[in-house]
Image (tube, rainbow, N blue to C red):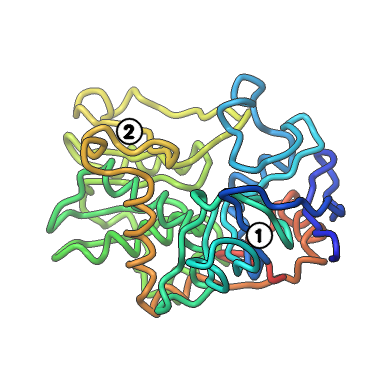
Amino acid sequence: MTNPSALWHTSAQKSLIRTQPSLPLTDGQCRIEAVYSLISSGTETLVASGQVPLELHRSMRVPYMEGDFSFPVKYGYSLVGKVIEGNKSILDKHVHLLHPHQSECVVNETDVTVIPNEVPPQRAVLASNLETALNAIWDSGLSTGDRILVVGMGLVGSLVAHLARQFPATQVRVAEADSVRQTLAKNLGFQLHDSSDVPFDVAFHTSGSSAGLQTGIDGVGNGGKIVELSWYGTRSAKVKLGGSFHQQRKQIISSQVSQIPPHQQARWDYRRRKQTVLELLKNDRWDEFLTATVNFADSPQLFDKLRQGDRSQLSWTIRY
């Protein structure tokens, strides 16, 4: 049996592929042969660049991560693979799980979710980021007819915008400073925000920049909500709260996927949320959000580009 390989970040400047030991199965485990995994560019670039604050080194850990954020570290959280060994009920089925980028892995059966036949394996890698987007929709209290601004058209921002425009009678506008991302947004059918737009009811911020957050704050009207999805790592965010923010009782709401919003917790758990996004992913339209694929062997070089600020694609999928 060939030993599996995994992507490791060995310093803030370097990533490489390392051979991993092939682990034996124990009761309740299965062996997964990876097919695809998704790079969550915002978070993973911060991890690969050493920008995880020391006080978050424990809470930011993900399942099956190895090493630590001071390097070396093996990190990632959206992998799709085929069960090649394990319980007969899931054998030969494609599954999704939270796992770093690795060609083969042994995991607990309770950590995998079988992908419906209607969802192609490559599309299923969107599941983790779509859970982030769904959480943000819940946090926002979005309603029929709302005027919505999405600031930052990376993958998470585009998924939020697509979910938002499915609410009846909503008006969705997107704000993006990067010209390449503006083109990607227009290709997905989104209308760009301009100064003539009326005040918004809700703004979602995903750009990870102070300027983007300020755009969200200034864009909503009296009593409006700004849902902050960005994670800044060790960077500071500077905004002006001396204008309309205080007088108009605007709200900034933190949204983070690791916790289900309090008003949903009595009825929802992580498995129900995962099943919901897989049901959503049965729609072929989601394929438009998968814009680039890289071979696993070339993934270290891709992280070199991401560290340098590459924003040429909406998403990057690793193919094994």
Question: Which residue is painted at 72% across and 32% down in the image?
Answer: 69
Question: Which residue is painted at 36% across and 69% down in the image?
Answer: 190
Q: Is residue 161 above or below residue 139?
A: below
Front label number (1 vs 2): 1
Q: Give the side of residue 308 with respect to residue 238, left or right.
A: right
For the residues marked 1 and 2, what is the alpha-carbon distance in whole angstroms?
40 Å
In terms of image quadrants, where is residue 9?
A: top right
SS at circle 1: strand
User: Mark 1 highlights which residue?
Assistant: 31
In terms of image quadrants, where is residue 48?
A: top right
Q: Is residue 211 above or below residue 274?
A: above
Question: Which residue is painted at 66% across and 41% down in the image?
Answer: 46
Q: Is residue 74 above or below residue 37?
A: above
Picture quarter with the N terminus: bottom right
Q: Give the side of residue 109 with respect to residue 45, left or right.
A: left
Residue 49 percent across, percent down from the top left = 74, 40
Please name whichever residue, 277 or 292, is drawn nearer the observer in this view of the structure: 277
SS at circle 2: strand
Residue 294 percent across, percent down from the top left = 72, 70
**Which of disc 2 and disc 1 is earlier in sequence?**
1
User: Label for residue 253?
Assistant: 2
Residue 284 percent across, percent down from the top left = 40, 80
Please name whichever residue, 216 or 263, is drawn nearer the observer in this view of the structure: 263
Please name whichever residue, 173 or 100, is drawn nearer the observer in this view of the structure: 100
Residue type indicated by callout 2: Ile
Picture quarter with the C terminus: bottom right
Please name whichever residue, 92 or 87, is drawn nearer the observer in this view of the structure: 87
- What is the crowding at mark 1: few (fewer than 14 residues within 10 Å), some, or many (at least 20)? many
